[in-house]
Amino acid sequence: MKSIITRGETVAEQALSARWALASLSLSMLLPSLGTSIANVGLPSLAQAFDAAFQDVQWIVLAYLLAITTLIVSVGRLGDITGRRRLLLIGILLFTLASILCGVAPTLWLLIAARAVQGLGAAIMMALTMAFVGETVPKAKTGSAMGLLGTMSAIGTALGPSLGGLLIAGLGWPAIFLVNVPLGVLTFVLAYRYLPADISKRKTDRKGFDIAGTLLLALTLSAYALAMTIGHGRFGPSNIALLSAAVFGTGLFVFAEARAASPLIQLTVFRNRVLSASLAMNALVSTVMMATLVVAPFYLSHALGLNQALVGIVMSIGPVISILSGVPAGRLVDRLEAPFVVVAGLVAMAAASIAMAVLPGISGYIAAIAMLTPGYQLFQAANNTAVMADVGPGQRGVISGMLNLSRNLGLITGASLMGAVFAFSSGTADITAAHPGAVASGMRMTFAVAAALIIVALAIAAGTYRRRPALGES
């Protein structure tokens, strides 16, 4: 009898420990997204506080995003080599300490440097959080865990603007960075206490870290990100030069990785159709989602004539739906096959993009968003599950980093590409002075392009999931 009771207590303790471990991972996903969205709303106040041009304070956001984009694959690989728990704790600590430095920074450029360090911490947290799901959650519940992480990311994105506005109004701009400190401390304590210990490896099992590949990838991604962001959608000589450097860097990176003894990314993984397709679909879907953030404010204010308060309310509908639909989407993935849910999510997104292009007025916009956001959550939960469920323990960090990287590259590309489509279709370089009819026309064309991109993603899914190989199979 005693052994039965003891065994029952052990199972209960393990279940409780798993819940707290998942809570620490959820906070590790929340903080990086909050770090992005909360800073955006503070840019006008920061420009005033440091007496700086808006182009200069934009680097507060850009430095953070560049650090995440350029390093997320590398830190994922480093976690695979050195131990994910140890590196995740370092990432949380870096993020928290950098948040303090941001809050007390006396000059703009010190603040930007601190934001880059904060971005490094965020990259570690984002890359390793998904990698830990396979070690803390039963395989049958992977979809639910991915849905929860998607919900936490959506909460961070949605909470940032409103929380940032309140903090700036009540306590001043340093508060938008210092609010991360107590959350960071809590995340560190939970992760330290409940995440499983790293499995010790023999020295012969530890592969060297690819420093040359890391530098090449970081420089290449930096060139691409800058090419897509500077000039605000207008491609000048600087953009073309940076894009050319990115293309050349990609070729050089592939050449170096093919000859590296311990490559940052094993090029053979791209032979796996599920992984390659998932990365491509992730980038396409993120490009479309960015269109709602870039184009919608102009459409709602200039074409539909809504004031700023109403624009804010309507824009908040998408994140609220995303928060509510994330966990149910994950549970649906657990009950059904992940490939089926990927296709269902893409079909919903394609229908929503078409609706956004053809349905008029505020009711049409809301109806389209009500389809687009759950479709996105279905896709994200299923796509991440399809990839991460079959990844071996030694590659979870780098594969998770690649998934996050494809999403970030899609967001960066979407901001530039969809913004350019919108401006071109509106027939004016200055959207703020465009006629309401021209803005509405630009909206229709932008989401016609978005629908085409989702149809491409659907074609990729259909071609990939006819036969579903395990990860590692070519």
Image: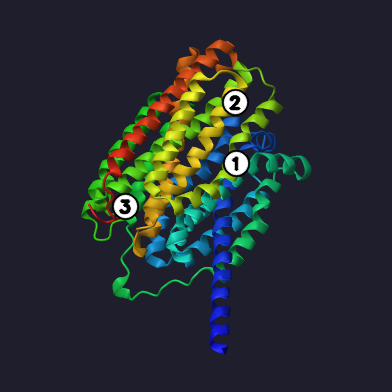
The residue tagged with tag 3: helix, strand or loop?
helix
Q: Residue at x 66, y 31 (%)?
A: 312
The residue tagged with tag 2: helix, strand or loop?
helix
N-term mark: 3 or 1? 1
In three-dimensional space, the C-alpha distance between marks 1 and 2, rounded to whole angstroms, equals: 16 Å
In the rendered structure, which amino acid carries the disc numbered 3?
Answer: Gly
Q: Residue at x 37, y 44 (%)?
A: 219
Q: Which residue is mark 3?
A: 213
Q: Nearer the viewer, mark 3 or mark 1?
A: 1
N-term mark: 1 or 2? 1
Q: Which residue is mark 2?
A: 297
Confirm whether residue 226 shows in the render. no
Q: Position of residue 5 (x, y in %)?
A: 58, 84
Q: Name the residue nearer the viewer: 368 or 230.
A: 368
Q: Position of residue 242 (x, y in %)?
A: 37, 33
In the rendered structure, which amino acid carries the disc numbered 1?
Answer: Ser
Farthest residue, direction bottom: 2
Confirm whether residue 265 shows in the render. yes
In the rendered structure, which amino acid carries the disc numbered 2?
Answer: Pro
Q: Name the residue nearer the viewer: 302 or 473.
A: 473
In three-dimensional space, the C-alpha distance between marks 3 and 2, rounded to whole angstroms, equals: 40 Å
Decide: is 183 above or below 249.
Answer: below
Crowding near pointer 3: few (<14 within 10 Å), some, many (20+)? many
Taking the image as shown, residue 324 lies to the left or right of residue 67, namely right
Q: Position of residue 459 (x, y in %)?
A: 32, 34
Q: Position of residue 54 (x, y in %)?
A: 60, 31
Q: How many marks?
A: 3
Taking the image as shown, residue 345 lies to the left or right of residue 27, namely left
Tell me whether circle 1 and circle 2 mark residues in contact (CB < 8 Å).
no
Number of the label disc, if any, that sits on residue 37? 1
Q: Name the residue nearer the viewer: 85 or 360.
A: 360
